[in-house]
Structures are given as structure tokens and as C-alpha cells.
Image (tube, helix red, strand yellow):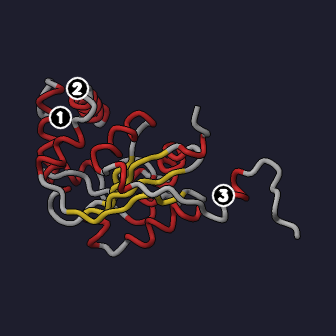
Amino acid sequence: MAHPKEEKTLILIKPDGVQRSLIGEIISRYEQTGLKLIALKFIVPTPDMVEKHYTLDPSWLQRTGEKTIAGYKAKGITPPSEDPMEVSGMTLEKLKKYLSSGPVVAMVWQGMNAVAMVKKITGSTEPLTADVGTIRGDFMLDSYQTADEDKRAVRNLTHMSGSVDEAENEIKFWFKPEEIIKYKLVQEGILYDVNLDGILE
């Protein structure tokens, strides 16, 4: 069984993050935690790639549609449809336009509890309600309401894997095995060595 330090997750810096010149800032947030960058590429996704990415999990459409409808109702707004698949279809079209509008930075990060750590550092999906100190809370001011009024996807700078299984599937989609680099960082001895051997001479 693999050591927890080998857990991996996928992050995409979306076109708005690239255009805002936040690539270095976003990468540094993950680096400072102790996570290790093991793959990176700069790419302009096609709409077809974006659709395949979001539908790697067959339940994504149904789940996203139900969540969106519930969100509308919680705000006292009538959803555009009561059919989850129809609603998520609308969301997917907006995401395809958003992510294919310009370059995206695709990355794989590795480390202890990588998926959960990235979620904590990145913040919740809606920048308006994301906590101060998170990437989305600190660097973006968009909201679901504004995005809905403008008929576009919410601009939130990054995508992150939602679970270990999701990360595994997304990494395989974005990267070939040979594009993922295996190497050691000096800091791993401090983060993971049981006895902190090798510090004193």
C-alpha cells in the first residue's frame, strides 16, 4: 500500500487566473504548504476536452444539476429547469466556453493529504463566500448570482480534484505517465522522516 505522502491531486489554473498574472502566486501557495509539483503543462483546452474532463465521472451531470437546483431554491430563485440533467447541461456549456477561452496551467501536486490540503488552500467554489486566506477568497470577487445574471460560469481561478478517486481519473486524462516526474525534495526529510535523521552533523 502506498504511503499517504504519495497522494496526488490535479489543479488547473483557469484562463482568468492566467490573465490576472496569478500563476506564480497560486503555485507558491501550494508550494509553501510542503506539497511537491510533479507535473506541469501550459495548454489551451478545446471545448471537447473540457466536456470530457467534467464528465469523467458519469454521475457528475446528475449531481451538479441537483446541487444547482437546490442552490437556486435556497436563495428563493426559481431554477431554469427542474430537470437536473438539463440544468447541468447549461452549466457544462458555460464551463466549456470559460475553460477553452485561453491558456490553462495543468498541474499535478503530490504530498500528504494532497487532495484535502489543496481544497483547504483553494477555498470554496464561489469566491464571494470563500474564506479569507484562501486563493479564491483572496484573489477573486465573483459570485454565483452575478455569473447567473451574466449567463456565464463563475470565475474562480482554479479547478481542483474533489476526491482521491477523482484526482486519479483527472490526472490520467490530462497527463501521460511519462509526463509525471519522480524526484526527491530536500524538505521531504523534514516533512516525512519519522526520526528527523540527518539534521545534525
SS at badge 2: helix
Q: Are marks 2 and 3 in contact (CB under 8 Å)?
A: no
Q: Which residue is mark 1?
A: 88
Mark 2, Cα crowd under 10 Å, few <14 / some 14-19 / many 20+, is some
Q: Amino acid at mark 1?
A: Ser
SS at badge 1: helix
Q: Residue at x 49, y 50 (%)?
A: 118
Residue 127 at least partly seen:
no
Residue 94 rendering spot, x and y as whole percentages: 14, 48
Q: Is 95 rendered above or below residue 66?
A: below
Question: In front of the other: label 2 or label 3?
Answer: 3
Q: Disc 3 or 1, which lies upstream in sequence?
A: 1
Q: Disc 2 or 3, which lies upstream in sequence?
A: 2
Marker disc for residue 62: 2
In the drawing, does residue 12 fall left or right of residue 46? Answer: right
Q: Is 53 rendered above or below residue 58?
A: below
Marker disc for residue 188: 3
